[in-house]
Amino acid sequence: LVSVIERLKGKKSFLAAGLMSGTSMDGIDVALVRLTAAAESSGVDLVGFGTSPYPEELRGTLRDLAYGGQCSTEDLAVLHTGVAVAFANAFHATCRDVEVKAADVDFIGSHGQTVAHVPPTSGGTNLIAGTLQLGPPGMIAVLTGVMTVGDFRSADIALGGQGAPLAPYADYVLRRSRTQNRLILNIGGIANVTYLPANCSVGEVIAFDTGPGNMVVDELYRVLYPGEGSYDKLNELLTAAEPSHTLVERFLDMSYFGVAPPKSAGHREFGGRLAWEFLSQAESGGLRKVDTLASAVTLTTRSIHSALKAYVMPHGEIDEIFVTGGGSRNPIMMRELGMMFDPIVVRPIDDLGVPAEAKEAVDFAVLARESLLCRPNVLNAVTGASRASVLGTIALGA
Amino acid sequence: LVSVIERLKGKKSFLAAGLMSGTSMDGIDVALVRLTAAAESSGVDLVGFGTSPYPEELRGTLRDLAYGGQCSTEDLAVLHTGVAVAFANAFHATCRDVEVKAADVDFIGSHGQTVAHVPPTSGGTNLIAGTLQLGPPGMIAVLTGVMTVGDFRSADIALGGQGAPLAPYADYVLRRSRTQNRLILNIGGIANVTYLPANCSVGEVIAFDTGPGNMVVDELYRVLYPGEGSYDKLNELLTAAEPSHTLVERFLDMSYFGVAPPKSAGHREFGGRLAWEFLSQAESGGLRKVDTLASAVTLTTRSIHSALKAYVMPHGEIDEIFVTGGGSRNPIMMRELGMMFDPIVVRPIDDLGVPAEAKEAVDFAVLARESLLCRPNVLNAVTGASRASVLGTIALGA
């Protein structure tokens, strides 16, 4: 460790990689970035980016588990390895594509693959809580030969926090503006927001999971249109659809939406079970398939809108909204948000210089930098933990 | 990390803790040790030692899982936390008992709780393999405030190794002799040996799991004498028993015993399933309950004896055998071993200055020291991995 650290210490900037796979398990995102060593530095250059799909069988197993399937601990041990190998392969593939030598990469920040996230329900020291990301950093490190930081969520959970969201710290470092009150809206499987008032300090950041992102829409699309996986097709279907506001209203009554932050969500709240209930109510209301999809889209946009009205706007104005995650590529979702928030402009995060597809992976490279330099990399006011900590465990790969 | 490392670098000796819970899940062992920074140094003083039982319910759940029970990933995420809390509490309890301030401890090496171990079956790069230790180091670190190294087995598995045994590295560092050909025999749930020829180099060490330790005996005792958990009672029963050599011979035919090292074993090979088969054959042979127990003891001693004859003695002589683990406290097992190996003296490891109860926990403090100083801490000739690596992932606890 000493020699490894000496090497890092001498550097003013790093070549780093961020590895991310979200709850939708669409693929493993790899961002190669050059970033400065200085704390709170926003100097990040995206050197390269790539996405590698999971092997089909592995993805199927992971999805089953994330949706509540049972397994033995032996199954899970083997899956840990399978995910680590897939992450390492994804890293190597992107390095090859963008002609970067793996040996030149200083470190990797790997989120791993979440297959369970159980935040404390009553906050404080209630430890009937946990989080499970597959793909041990120790394995990724030896498979890539690059020092790897992983397991970013555990420590925050142990300190009574939600272990999520983690992106707000990176948003604060990389994306706050001197003059604009900015909102970063990530619509992944789950939707979450980071509110960054102009020129804000760490303590002024507000962030939380608003509720479903694409999770319910994706699940319904999979069930209603089996085998037609393309998102272009989904977007085409949605253009000819009409949401049922009665159905949406009914689901906006869910207890999650009434709880003030800190809060975080996952498959547990908005996964398969909810999608099936949504579908069953849509069917008993005689809704067309496309209208059921459209209603799920509106559940997402409406829940985002009301969350911001309830928990952000009372604290300050929003001048601009930058959308990231898969939702930023859904024109219907973007149009609905544009209308709801008018006159605030809703734009894809690409306008801030990072492709939506690469954003989260970039964030984990930044979080890993802080782990290695022993700087707290979580906003505990956001997660609800008793204190900020240096998240991430470090595998040397030596 | 930099500041943390500066602090470690300046030190010639460390106060460290090793945390261990074996496959039998009898309790969490905590060894507080003072050890020098120098590589290959055998200077370890045991400052204090304690064992804390798991909360009853947690232990029951862990045992079910280790014996092949099914669970959801959410269950497992919560168990991860439960084990981390139990480990942190055990650490604090021992610190209190021996009047050491937690803040004075430089680092913790935590084995965690194994609930699955699936070594590669065909060696090399076959990665249908994995290992799962509960109790993330990231959680233990923030719950104790002490830098914690954990997850020692993953990287070796990723390099095609068995991820076990790990004790041989510590045995090599702490227990080799200049003049004696020494064998360290650990009879825990599984039995494993480390052969240390006099004045040996790393490459001369031979080590592997010989097969069952106390696992089969314990399981049978639990089933045949429910509610009479005391080991004194077990030892008393055994004094009046007679093993069935026919039964033992039959089980010595198991394929595991015929495989040359590297090899490692766990619940999969010698857990509940095997115990039940052993019991069923004993019952159909009309064996008394006590004789069934005695036969399981002899299965352990005979499998150790034949493993040493087949895989150690052809490489060199054994002058002395030091026994550690629960088996060193079983007078019948010790007597059988003494008779089988006569004239080689079989002694408890306590004669080397470390109580058998503390030995493995001490080992993990030593392994953690190597992780932090970036020194390889595994014998890859023993595990079968493609290279030696620096095992363990580091959580700062900051």
Image: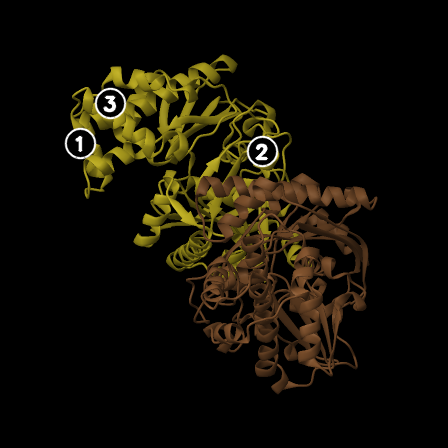
Chain colours: A brown, B yellow
Q: Which residue is disc 1 drawn over?
A: B237
Q: Which residue is disc 2 drawn over?
A: B127
Residues under labels 1 and 2: Cα distance? 44 Å
In contact (CB < 8 Å): disc 1 and disc 3: no
Q: Amino acid at mark 3?
A: Gln
Secondary structure, mark 3, is helix
Q: How packed is label 3: few (under 14 Cα within 10 Å), some, or many (20 or more)?
A: some
Q: How packed is label 2: few (under 14 Cα within 10 Å), some, or many (20 or more)?
A: many
Instruction: Say if B24 sits above or below B381 in the image.
Output: below
Residue pushed farthest right?
A99
Indicate the chain on which mark 3 is placed. Answer: B
* Camera sees residue B194: no
Q: Position of residue B51 (x, y in %)?
A: 36, 49
Occupied quadrant, residue A83:
top right
In contact (CB < 8 Å): disc 2 and disc 3: no
Give A83 or A105, whichever is nearer the viewer.
A83
